[in-house]
Image: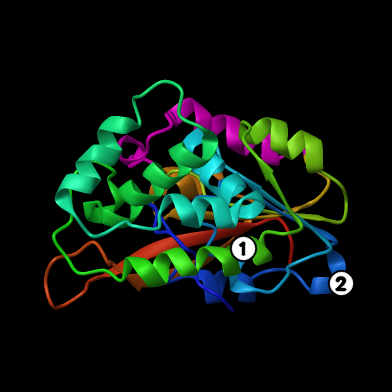
């Protein structure tokens, strides 16, 4: 098991072990697709989940970072060679994201800085905390090796489901949680939650879906197997971390 090289809103670091334990038996699927990839915590939790693996996300900057990490790790490391935990460099990187003419590697490097040095990965506010950026940059090479055979996509979830659906497919989906959509850069509205439910009802493969525990989602997915799980609320500022309830929804036994 390895860690993701980034944090991301809704990341599954604390639940990845339980999620993988809830996967169907390994011999029942030969392709593994993360439809809302984010930081890829579940993807990175194994050396390989299946012969074919797919990472998808709708955020183009995030996908560009993954692609540059996969195909050009050394060039990305060179672009980040002199990076520090610095308020000045952070806001320089933020401003430069609006600059026309940046190469994909230059954009990926600046986006990586925003992820690593922002508060709560909001990409806007500088987090005043120590971080070993040299170690973070060195880790890019290990991530590149893990991504070596992973297909990286930047498509709407419906397109991904249609493209990769087969009887031997396992889709893991971690969409923006219901009524938390404002925290995500890519818009995901109530009608998208409904559309996702409708699309999942048509596939031939298996799916495992992460959601927040609420009456609306329980009703939307009534008829499917629903597993209740808990994790610590790592966004809480107090010493006592409250428990946060989530649902794992699946179409297999």
The residue tagged with tag 1: helix, strand or loop? helix
Residue 146's disc is none
Residue behind mark 1: 43
Left or right of residue 45, residue 152 in this image: right
Q: How far across and down, in percent of the image, does residue 230 sit?
A: 39, 71
Q: How far across and down, in percent of the image, does residue 77 sit?
A: 48, 57
Q: Looking at this view, is 242 or 120 the one in front? A: 120
Q: CA distance from mark 1 to mark 2?
A: 18 Å
Q: In the figure, 47 relative to 86: above or below?
A: below
Q: How many marks?
A: 2
Q: How far across and down, in percent of the image, does residue 55 sit?
A: 65, 49
The C terminus, quarter of image: bottom right
Q: Sequence order check: which comes first, mark 1 or mark 2?
A: 2
The residue tagged with tag 2: helix, strand or loop? helix
Q: In the figure, 225 relative to 96: above or below?
A: below
Span highlighted in magenta in the image: 178-202
Residue 27's disc is 2
Task: Please give the name of the residue rendered at 48% of the width and 60% of the height, measured from the top-left corner.
Answer: 247
Q: In the figure, 95 relative to 153: above or below?
A: above
Marks 1 and 2: which is nearer the front? 1
């Amino acid at each position: 098991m390895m860690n993701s090289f980034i944090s991301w809103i809704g990341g599954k670091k604390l639940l990845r072990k339980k999620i993988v334990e809830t996967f169907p038996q390994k011999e029942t699927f030969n392709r593994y697709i993360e439809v809302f990839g984010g930081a890829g915590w579940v993807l990175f939790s194994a050396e390989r989940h299946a012969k074919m693996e797919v990472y998808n996300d709708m955020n183009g900057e995030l996908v560009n970072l993954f692609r540059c990490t996969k195909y050009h790790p050394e060039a990305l490391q060179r672009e980040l060679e002199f990076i520090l935990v610095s308020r000045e460099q952070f806001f320089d990187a933020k401003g430069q994201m609006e600059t026309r003419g940046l190469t994909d590697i230059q954009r990926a490097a600046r986006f990586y800085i925003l992820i690593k040095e922002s508060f709560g990965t909001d990409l806007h506010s500088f987090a005043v905390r120590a971080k070993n950026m040299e170690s973070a940059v060195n880790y890019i090479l290990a991530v590149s090796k893990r991504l070596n055979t992973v297909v990286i996509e930047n498509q709407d979830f419906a397109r991904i489901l249609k493209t990769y659906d087969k009887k031997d497919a396992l889709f893991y989906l971690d969409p923006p949680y219901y009524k938390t959509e404002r925290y995500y850069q890519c818009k995901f509205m109530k009608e998208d939650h409904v559309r996702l439910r409708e699309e999942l009802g048509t596939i031939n493969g298996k799916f495992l879906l992460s959601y927040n525990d609420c009456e609306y989602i329980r009703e939307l997915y009534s008829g499917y197997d629903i597993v209740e799980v808990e994790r610590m609320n790592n966004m809480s500022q107090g010493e006592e971390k409250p428990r946060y309830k989530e649902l794992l929804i699946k179409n297999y036994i």
